[in-house]
Amino acid sequence: MNELKDKNLRVKPITQVADDLGIDPTALEVYGPYKAKVRFGQLLEEKKLRGKLIMVTAMSPTPAGEGKTTTSIGLVDAFNYLGHRAVGALREPSLGPVFGLKGGATGAGRARVFPSDEINLHFTGDIHAVSAAHNLLAAMVDNRLHFDGACGLLDCRRVTWKRVVDMDDRVLREVVVGIGGPLRGIARETGYDITAASEVMAILCLASDLQDLKERCGHILIGYSPEKKMIFARDIKAHGAMAALLKDAIKPNLVQTIEGHPVFIHGGPFANIAHGTNSVIATRLALSLADYVVTESGFGSDLGAEKFFDIVVRTGHIPPPAACVLVATIRALKYHGGVPLAELEKENLAALKKGFANLQKHIENLRIFGVPFVVAINRFPQDTEAELSLAKRLCQEEGARVALSEVYARGGEGGVELASQVIEAIEKDEYNFKFLYPLEMPLLDKIETVARRIYGAAAVAMEGKIERKIKRLEKAGFGRLPICIAKTQYSLSSDDEALGRPRDFTLIVTDASLSAGAGFVVIYCGDIMTMPGLPRHPAAERIDVTPDGQITGLE
């Protein structure tokens, strides 16, 4: 573990981290010296949710990176630096982005979680358990087809359940299985999604306990009968075995920041194709143990934050956040103002001002939900004083609280201004939380509401067959579910090249599917894919292991 050579580390044995947090040793399942799982049942029964929840979101992400996770981790350290008991509740990195475009996802600089190499790779095996449970269901589907025939309980042409793997692998998007004769099952077209897009991952993160998880697995739609009747996982008796594979994965994972402060890392759905937040179990556990709990939602406010409010909070398992943090960077503002990636380190006040339109829309989005918030300008070494001053002034002209965050360079001490502003926002600013739409609203109207109010679209368009599909889901009794829109993270629109603040655009809906177990309807927009591909030069090319077993290239 080469991280241990870092002179900034103040890490402790995980048993001490748990003891400092008030977790009884009998509730701890230790995975080596620095990570553990927590048996949460009795803890949650004994303790009330006393903490205040802070949700961290961001402006529309760019290839330059905005440091949302770094900010979240640094904020935990900053609260503790100020003498408050604070805990993080974050998502687990997927191997797809780790080996693909993003690389490691455990913070950076002096705001990191530890042990980052283990967290970035296999960690405690939760994502593998999700893959196994998902693929067990897929195997049982094909087994049923093999013994029942192409038109038995399931119509082989109407199977909706694919397989998953925790890796970016574009050639698996569409595959044919069962070829080679009757002993190999029934030949049919299917495909793979990445594990972070699996409904099982969403279920793991939205379930309140193991029994709830098992019931939700039973509600998974796997396809249709020859008579077009919906067939669920419970109809082929798969949900019990799936829950058995997930019985350990449902327990939250406890680690720490490099300053020795506790963080629960549990679950990892993407926000561009799923709901994008860690498990409600981990968040509830953190809220029962701390004064302040910092969580994050994936990507920008148009994706992760909207879904956090309208899907996660609606479960009733966690309260609405007491405040939010909206992360922005000078680099991202200039990128949305038209500056190429290679030129972002040069001062450009005109582009920054133009790109501020993107951040301005995210400020408006948070105001829609009525929760106090602070804009955090995550400082990078190349940022000039003129740029920082202009960004602050533009935020203040919008009437938004704004704070400079220097957690990358200075750790918790560098986040004191931000933490202080968050506390002041909680104590002094108006709080009037509200959902974006009522559940009674028709599904098509929910789509239009999100498109117009959160994305800024002028209209929504879809083919007639997609509209009829959505109406059939409503007729089948699923119209009261919230929607989970899957679209590009790089733009407020469904076109990833439309930077800044697109206006007068039409949101293109390309498909819809039911995630009855997770409890939402997925609406696909634009060219979004549930199985990413590796870039021309993936991060995997830089990752290596030394002869003594030290991982390199994950920073």
Image: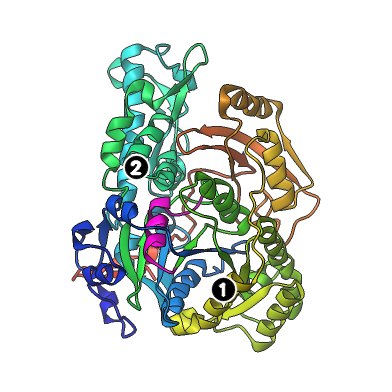
Q: Which residues are magenta?
A: 275-291
Q: Is residue 246 left or right of residue 408?
A: left
Q: In this rendered view, identify the residue nearer to me: 158 or 427.
A: 427
- On the image, the x and y values in percent for residue 384 come to 64, 86
Within 10 Å of the Cα at label 1, are there few (<14), some (14-19), or many (20+) other Cα atoms? many
Q: Residues within 10 Å of mark 2 (few under 14, many from 20)?
A: many
User: Which residue is drawn at the image coordinates 64% and 52% (left, top)?
Assistant: 434
Q: Quadrant of the C terminus?
A: bottom left
Q: If the image is split into quadrants, where does the N terminus sit?
A: bottom left
- Colour style of the rendered protein structure: rainbow
Horizontal and vertical percent position of residue 92: 39, 57
Q: Is residue 211 left or right of residue 421?
A: left
Residue 131, labelled with which disc?
2
Q: CA distance from mark 1 to mark 2?
A: 38 Å
Residue 437 versus residue 91 in the image, above or below: above
Residue 287 belongs to magenta span: yes
Q: Is residue 186 visible?
A: yes
Of residues 493 and 315, the one drawn nearer to the viewer in this rendering: 315
Q: Position of residue 398 (x, y in %)?
A: 75, 71
Q: Residue furthest bottom?
A: 385
Secondary structure, mark 2, is: helix
In the figure, 199 relative to 168: above or below?
above
Q: Are marks 1 and 2 in contact (CB under 8 Å)?
A: no
Residue 173 position in % (x across, y down): 47, 38
Residue at image x 58%, y 52%? 309
As drawn, 193 above or below 293: above
Nearer-N-terminus badge (1/2):
2
- Type of the residue with mark 1: Val
> Which labelled disc corresponds to residue 422?
1
Does residue 433 show up magenta in the picture?
no
